[in-house]
């Protein structure tokens, strides 16, 4: 994987995880759908990612055109690069 691709993956993961709302310790009960329903909804291009190819394309376009998003991208990329140089946590 190239450094550019690695940085983009790190940025994407960071964007997705920071975009999730904080629950502030609240607990909420949720019903778990049957496995067949879960498997039927998986994306074929990459079943473990919540974002689609279209989402990533829109994100790239936004970075190119939106100054604030470009700034966030650079900050997240810098953070991701720093994390990659740190030793593994124990």
Image: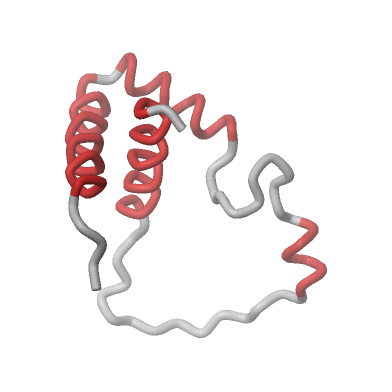
Quadrant housing residue 2:
top left
Residue 33 image point, x, y percent: 71, 75
Look at the picture and state if 76 lies above or below 66: below
> Is 27 placed left or right of 75 in the picture?
right
Residue 82 position, x and y percent, is: 17, 43
35 versus 85 height, above or below: below
Q: Quadrant of the C terminus?
A: bottom left
Taking the spot 25% from the left edge, 62% from the top edge, the residue there is 88
> In the image, is 68 to the left or to the right of 46?
left
Left or right of 1? Residue 30 is: right
Residue at image x 36%, y 57%? 20
- The image position of residue 5, as x and y in percent, is 42, 29
**Display colour scheme:** secondary structure
Q: Position of residue 4 (x, y in %)?
A: 37, 26
Residue at 65%, 78% in the rendered image: 32
Give the tally of numbered discs. Answer: 0
């Amino acid at each position: 994987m190239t450094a550019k691709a690695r940085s983009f993956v790190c940025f994407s993961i960071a964007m997705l995880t920071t975009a999730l709302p904080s629950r502030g310790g609240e607990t909420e009960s949720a019903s778990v759908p049957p496995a067949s329903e879960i498997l039927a909804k998986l994306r074929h291009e990459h079943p473990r990612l919540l974002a689609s190819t279209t989402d990533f394309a829109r994100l790239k376009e936004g970075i190119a055109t939106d100054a604030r998003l470009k700034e966030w991208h650079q900050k997240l990329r810098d953070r991701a690069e720093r994390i990659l140089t740190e030793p593994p946590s124990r």
